Amino acid sequence: MGEAFQKSIELLSNKLNTPKNISIIPHKDPDGDALGSCMGLALFLQNKNHNVSIISPNDFPDFLAWIAKDNKSISLIKYNEKPKEAEEILRKTDLIFTLDFNSLGRAGDLKEILKESTASKIMIDHHESPDDYAEIMFSYPKIASTCEIVYDVITSLEAKCLTKNIATCLYAGIMTDTGSFRFEATTSKTHKIVATLKEFDIESHKIHQRIFDSFTVGRMKLLGKALSNMQYLNEYNTTLITLTQEELDSTNFQKGYTEGFVNYGLSLKGIKFAVIMIENKKEGIIKISFRSKGEFSVDVFAKTYFNGGGHKNAAGGSSKETLKETEKKFKEVLPLYKKQLCTQ
Ligand code: 5GP
Ligand code: MN
């Protein structure tokens, strides 16, 4: 971490000199990295006598619920469930940390409140192309997870700040965002951080079990459906999965059921680009996840065609058209990338 990081640490350290009211916000539909980084940071700040709340724009999957349940000392409010309470906290807040996103649009229905708030904003994030809303920025798109940046931030603020609970939360985020330490962005530093976290007696095998070995029969059946729907666009080294609302409903669908499904497309030999399109009738959108291997940037692809973004090898987006139209649009633009997808 360089000079800009040290400067940001100094600025942040000054702000944390006296006890503050602090709100920490993950992105909408928080994943393991978003929730793990928020909770890890919240525990650190609470130990330093700040008054901390996490305000999530909306619900998160069952397999992440333990992050909240194991840390009941931290108030965690879902804005979709208790908007008044969340607004009251945000009105009184001195500092707002936005974690694992870099554009207020990613905060869902909290977007306008955050935009209008005069509290100092601190961004901690690892996505490409950050917006300019934060007074203090820790924006490092090359780092595999926000949890690794939070680790650097808190240990720079106070060398001996880690506890078992903080380490557990950060481990969960690093593990999920690195695909269990296998994605390209995983570095020796990632492993060094994890080695340090492990010294706090964290039960990494149990964290893995809680997150990955928690399928319900319905979810497993939905995975079966997704795999049988997979289209093999061999000409482009690409796979596409689609799931209709009807297919989701036939399996007692719950939030998070489709998490990780897109990766199965990438596990096929030779595949460089994997896509899943999921119909969401309630929101009137098709939610799309993109994954790639190598130099093909799904961040750019998602930004160009599907109102999204993310990282080079993992991005998301959405479409307001029907599933069929979205699929058609995708197949129309895919040939433009044939060279990129077939010559690496
Ligand atoms: P996922 O496909 O797992 O939902 O997301 C993959 C990556 O892309 C994550 O880092 C996530 O934050 C980002 N992402 C997902 N959906 C969107 C979106 O609609 N817009 C932007 N800008 N990023 C997204
Ligand atoms: Mn992340």
Image (cartoon, grey):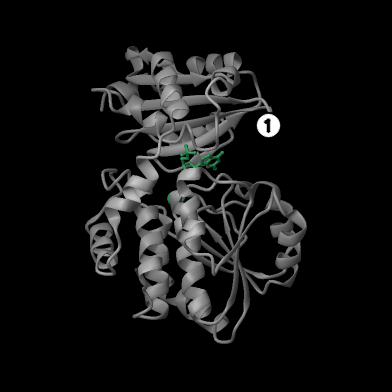
Q: Is residue 82 left or right of residue 193?
A: right
Residue appearing at x 56%, y 19% in the figure: 244
Q: Quadrant of the C terminus?
A: top left
User: Residue 133: where, in percent of width, then height?
Assistant: 62, 60
Check the image and report above or below for 335 versus 16.
above
Q: Quadrant of the N terminus?
A: bottom left
Q: Is residue 280 left or right of residue 261?
A: right
Residue appearing at x 40%, y 67% in the figure: 166
Name the residue furthest front. Answer: 217
Residue appearing at x 62%, y 79% in the figure: 20
User: Residue 287: where, in percent of width, then height?
Assistant: 56, 30
Residue appearing at x 50%, y 44% in the figure: 62
- Pick whichever, 200 or 270, lies toward us: 200
Q: Is residue 307 left or right of residue 87?
A: left
Q: Give the SS element for disc 1.
A: loop
Name the residue furthest bottom. Answer: 18
- Pick whichever, 323 or 43, lies toward us: 43
Residue behind mark 1:
283
Mark 1 beta carbon near ligand 1 (under 8 Å):
no
User: Residue 53: where, in percent of width, then height?
Assistant: 61, 66
Can residue 219 be spotted in the picture? yes
User: Residue 174: where, in percent of width, then height?
Assistant: 35, 54
Can residue 299 be spotted in the picture? no
- Under mark 1, the amino acid is Glu
